[in-house]
Image: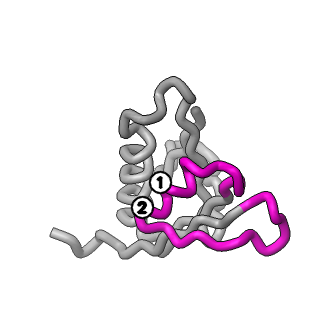
Amino acid sequence: MTAASLQESPGSTPIPITSPPEYGLLVRTDLQGHGLGWALLALLKDYAAADGLQRLEGSVLSDNAKMLRMCSEFGFSISPHPTDATLRVATFGLQSQSGAA
């Protein structure tokens, strides 16, 4: 699993954030079906919203029915990829939590 921090460390070079930011999520096959993907998506969404991002966007293989279903149920919009028929684009609109109590 790979994770990227949205926070800079002292002396580090900032990693540019693409617009919209892309996410990557992988749950090992034998660990699927236990809510880990849902928990990771929720954490990713909360982290990104708290950082003031407006949306997340990721590419999902067209034949990855589990991930497409999970994204849909989570509230992501699913659309065809503009240049690759083997992919779908999953997009989630965020609202900043900076003013949330």
Q: Amino acid at mark 2?
A: Glu
Distance of mark 2 from mark 1, alpha carbons? 5 Å
- Give residue 59's quadrant in the image: bottom right
Label 2, on which residue? 73
Contact (CB < 8 A) between labels 2 and 1?
Answer: yes
Q: Indicate whether residue 68 is drawn in magenta.
A: yes
Where 11 falls versus 53 (above or below)?
Answer: above
Residue 11 in picture, x, y percent from top left: 57, 43
Q: Secondary structure at mark 2?
A: helix
Which residue is found at the position 69% from the left and 64% from the top?
Answer: 88
Residue 65's x, y, as percent? 60, 51
> Residue 9: which numbered mark, if any?
none
Secondary structure found at label 1: helix
- Please rate how many residues cluster around mark 2, counting C-alpha atoms within 10 Å: few if below 14, some from 14 to 19, many from 20: few
Q: Which percent across, then down, holds residue 80?
A: 71, 71
Using residue 81 as the reference point, say whether residue 92 is left or right of it.
left
Above or below 43: residue 46: below
Q: How many marks?
A: 2
